[in-house]
Image: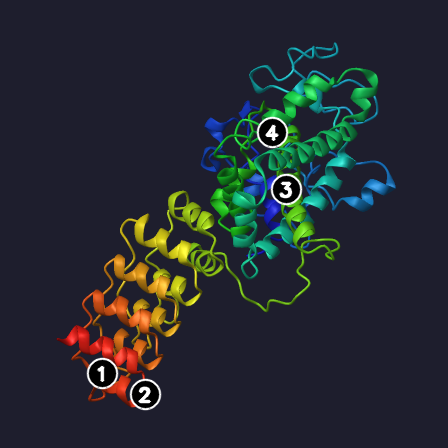
């Protein structure tokens, strides 16, 4: 499900989750990340804040008008919010230090060691360049839409997940993430250029701010569970589940009572998060489709298939043989591996028809409760019927070893058992496996036993084998 401009605008800009009636301090730490903890302002409750055609950047600076023509072109008409009793903020990005209303209360340059103490970054946030923030949000809109469209199209998410879990060496994955975080740091240098040039904003302060905003790095993403955490965030950002999406975009450890700073911090969070995740997927696209240029669109049209549910992704993981992705979906996402497709085929059945022995073994030995090994599809065949029809004796052995019923008859095919099918295919080895597992020689398909079929088809060795087991 693709995310549009309105989604991000509502979450980052003057959303009901970031504005309060009073000047009471707002804590955006993890303890207050739940959106239910925030109250709406009266103007927002009245529903008159956003025009339907307004973009993200139109509201990010809704409490402060710009004076230049170029900025007027960037932003929609601003919202007349209830004014704070505090003194107004000075213009951002013109070299002046933040006033007491924008900082921690001192008229001196913030001490780099004290910046970020207890999550308070007011001393440097006033130096952010609003034009850069607007640029971030416009780019973030594009990234979130591209990422959503690509991940929910065909089996893209499963293919990327397999690459992220097993296809890229851990050291290279760490290097890739670190490089993208470094690019975000460079973007922050651009946003705080005035403060950096004046010496009022240090590199240490920016590193602290980034750590408070992009909390996944490095403490989570670079751990053994990092790949799973990355995929979980990717799923949240692209799946359309609004509550998790909101919680993800507000997972910052910043404390401020300045409404405008809240918006800027959330904008930085969204931009940093989408930049890293979008770049990682883009890297995968580059190495798997070298001819791809720009965005995340596939070269080949995959139709309009969408796959934004756990069940669909489980089926795709089985079809592609991605045991690692199936394990992730089962253990981390708690997916139901007893799911069936539109033809009533279980994941066991699908693993057989797609010749995925590793997936089949995983389903039969590692999943609890185990998917029904004998459940027939809408054609009446069981997974064992399908394995015999495919002529794959190894899959037959795996199913038999796991306890598959060898004498199940297909009522839609003259009561054919797996043994009848093996004889029809002239597969002596499979016949021997089935007979050793207790297949009944006397069972009839359309009035004929397996021995009759072998004789009619001239399979003399199979006929002799059947006679041996019938004695």
First-in-chain label (4 vs 1): 4
Q: Is residue 53 visible?
A: yes
- For mark 2, what is the residue? 457
Query: With 192 as the anchor, is 81 left or right in this view?
Result: left
Q: Residues within 10 Å of mark 2 (few under 14, many from 20)?
A: some
- The residue indicated by pointer 3 is 274
Helix, strand or loop status at disc 3: helix
Which quarter of the rendering shows the C terminus? bottom left
Q: Residues within 10 Å of mark 4 (few under 14, many from 20)?
A: many
Characterize the local packing of mark 3: few (<14), some (14-19) or many (20 or more) Cα atoms within 10 angstroms: many
Q: CA distance from mark 2 to mark 4?
A: 72 Å
Number of the label disc, if any, that sits on residue 451: 1
What's the CA distance linking mark 3 and mark 1? 65 Å
Is 341 rendered above or below residue 69? Answer: below
- Residues at marks 4 and 3, CA–CA distance in whole angstroms: 12 Å
Mark identifier at residue 213: 4
Q: Is 397 placed above or below 459 here?
A: above
Give the CA distance from mark 2 to mark 3.
Answer: 63 Å
Mark 2 or 3, nearer chain start:
3
For label 2, the SS is helix
- Where's residue 7, x and y in %? 59, 49
Residue 175 percent location from the top left of the image: 65, 33
Residue at the spot 79% in from the left edge and 20% down from the top edge = 196
- x and y percentages locating residue 100 in the rendered image: 69, 15
């Amino acid at each position: 499900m693709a995310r549009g401009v309105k989604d991000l605008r509502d979450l980052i800009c003057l959303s009901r989750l970031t504005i309060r009636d009073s000047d009471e301090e707002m804590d955006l730490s993890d303890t207050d990340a739940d959106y239910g903890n925030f109250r709406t302002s009266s103007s927002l409750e009245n529903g008159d804040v956003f025009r339907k055609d307004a973009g993200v950047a139109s509201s990010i600076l809704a409490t402060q008008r710009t004076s230049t023509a170029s900025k007027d072109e960037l932003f929609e008409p601003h919202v007349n919010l209830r004014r704070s009793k505090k003194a107004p903020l000075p213009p951002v990005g013109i070299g002046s230090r933040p006033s007491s209303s924008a900082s921690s209360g001192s008229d001196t340059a913030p001490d780099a060691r004290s910046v970020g103490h207890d999550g308070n970054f007011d001393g440097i946030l006033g130096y952010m360049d609003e034009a850069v923030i607007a640029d971030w949000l416009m780019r973030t809109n594009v990234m979130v839409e591209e990422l959503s469209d690509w991940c929910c199209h065909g089996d893209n998410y499963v293919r990327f997940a397999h690459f992220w879990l097993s296809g890229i060496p851990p050291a290279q994955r760490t290097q890739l993430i670190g490089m993208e975080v470094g690019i975000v740091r460079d973007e922050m240098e651009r946003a705080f250029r005035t403060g950096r040039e004046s010496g009022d904003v240090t590199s240490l302060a920016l590193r602290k701010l980034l750590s408070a905003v992009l909390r996944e790095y490095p403490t989570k993403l670079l751990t053994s569970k990092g790949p799973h955490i990355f995929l979980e965030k990717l799923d949240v950002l692209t799946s359309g589940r609004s509550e998790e999406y909101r919680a993800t975009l507000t997972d910052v450890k910043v404390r401020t009572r300045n409404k405008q700073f809240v918006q800027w911090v959330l904008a930085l969070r969204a931009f940093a998060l989408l930049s890293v995740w979008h770049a990682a997927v883009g890297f995968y696209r580059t190495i798997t489709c070298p001819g791809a240029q720009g965005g995340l669109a596939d070269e080949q049209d995959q139709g309009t298939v969408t796959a934004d549910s756990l069940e669909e992704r489980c089926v795709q993981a089985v079809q592609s043989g991605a045991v690692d992705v199936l394990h992730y979906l089962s253990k981390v996402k708690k997916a139901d591996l007893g799911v069936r497709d539109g033809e009533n085929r279980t994941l066991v059945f699908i693993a057989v028809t797609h010749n995925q022995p590793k997936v089949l073994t995983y389903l039969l030995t590692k999943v609890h409760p185990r998917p029904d090994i004998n459940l027939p599809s809408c054609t009446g065949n069981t997974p064992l019927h399908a394995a015999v029809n495919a002529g794959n004796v190894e899959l037959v052995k795996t199913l038999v070893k796991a306890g598959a019923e060898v004498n199940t008859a297909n009522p839609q095919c003259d009561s054919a058992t797996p043994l009848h099918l093996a004889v029809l295919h002239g597969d002596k080895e499979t016949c021997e496996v089935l007979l050793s597992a207790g297949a009944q020689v006397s069972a009839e398909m359309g009035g004929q036993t397996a021995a009759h079929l072998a004789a009619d088809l001239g399979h003399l060795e199979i006929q002799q084998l059947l006679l041996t087991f019938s004695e």
